[in-house]
Amino acid sequence: MDLRPAPVRSLMLHGSAMADADVPEFRETLAFLGDTEVDLRVTPSFHDILNAGGLDVPLGRVIHVEDLDVEAPDMVLTFGGDGTVLETAAMLGGRPIPVLGINTGRLGFLSHLPMIGATSALKDILTGGYKLESRAMLAVDFPEAKLGSQFRALNEITVHRRDVASMIRVSVHRNGVFVNRYWSDGLIVSTATGSTAYSLSCGGPIIHPDSNAIVLNPIAPHNLHDRPVVIPLDGTLEILAEGRDDHLMLTLDTRSYTVSAPARFTVRPADHPFLLVQLPDVDFIETVRRKLHLGLDAREGDFGKPGQETRPSQR
């Protein structure tokens, strides 16, 4: 896949409801885009959100998902948090359209460009001043569930108990080889991208997105020796989830489904990756260190400036 950046001539806008404090910057960004020759389009849901919020801004024309196969934009701009980027990844359905997240949320690992100053950054981005990252996605094959065709996840796939207090049993094989049988509240199958999300909150490791790896991470395991396991991305996972209840929950990123138990499905790498737009100077390790405050020590003052990483503590 060609990951060389190119000038942007058409944009699709998608987003979620934004706080009042973000509206002035949003108007400025839209005014800037309106003064360019970029062809602007907007998703129906975002169009409705903006109309409901009384935002009278030039948005271009509404474009539906089914139109993307005929007139795909050069890039998608999302306004929101990481959840909005995940929603966009599902909406694109594997189409190779780069996505740039403008952050109106909180942490913003995927939606990394702050709303404040977005206009200045877009001036360079529209001329090709960005980099593209290919992020692996996971695909689920679950014929019995009949949940549609967009069975892909950028962050993680989880199966977990629904309305009962008892644990469930999740058996995992990889390419026909037994991996483990977990007695737990559930199991997370996380991509490297998702390693800073739900999996991290359940004690999983942080994995660089360039790593061709995924994480099997049990949720509140009964056996204390059941720890997160990092395995290669390639291959097929066969998963069987059983419990006392006749239903379980299956989630793909932000989407949740109730499925019958026992639930038997497979997880494999999706045929097409997700294309994430990054600023040229963005580095994953630096982003993680800054957003998660890794290595900060109040005794050492302004940790993180060049030359300060190895300064000894003052005791």
Image (spheres, rainbow, N blue to C red):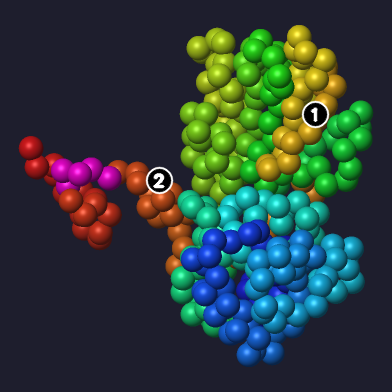
Q: Nearer the viewer, mark 1 or mark 2?
A: 1
Residue corresponding to mark 1:
258
Residue at figure coordinates x 58%, y 85% from the top left? 32
Q: Nearer the viewer, residue 177 or 221?
A: 221
Relative to residue 156, is residue 278 drawn left or right? left
Q: Position of residue 109 (x, y in %)?
A: 52, 53
Residue extending furthest toward the left: 315
Dominant secondary structure, magenta = helix
Q: Is residue 8 above or below residue 218?
A: below
Dividing the picture into quarters, in which one does residue 9 lie?
Answer: bottom right
Dividing the picture into quarters, in which one does residue 50 lie?
Answer: bottom right
Residue corresponding to mark 2:
292
Residue at figure coordinates x 82%, y 15% from the top left? 246
Query: For the residue carrying disc 1, how many other residues have a C-alpha within 10 Å: few (<14), some (14-19), or many (20+)?
Result: some
Question: In which quadrant will I find the N terminus?
Answer: bottom right
Q: Nearer the viewer, residue 230 or 118?
A: 118
Query: For the residue carrying disc 2, how many other residues have a C-alpha within 10 Å: few (<14), some (14-19), or many (20+)?
Result: few
Earlier residue among tags 1 and 2: 1
Question: Could you tell me if residue 276 is visible in this image?
Answer: no
Give the residues in magenta.
296-300
Q: Position of residue 183 (x, y in %)?
A: 64, 12
Dividing the picture into quarters, in which one does residue 162 lie?
Answer: top right
Distance of mark 1 from mark 2, alpha carbons? 33 Å
Q: Is residue 111 above or below residue 60?
A: above
Residue at figure coordinates x 54%, y 80% from the top left? 28
The type of residue carrying mark 2 is Leu
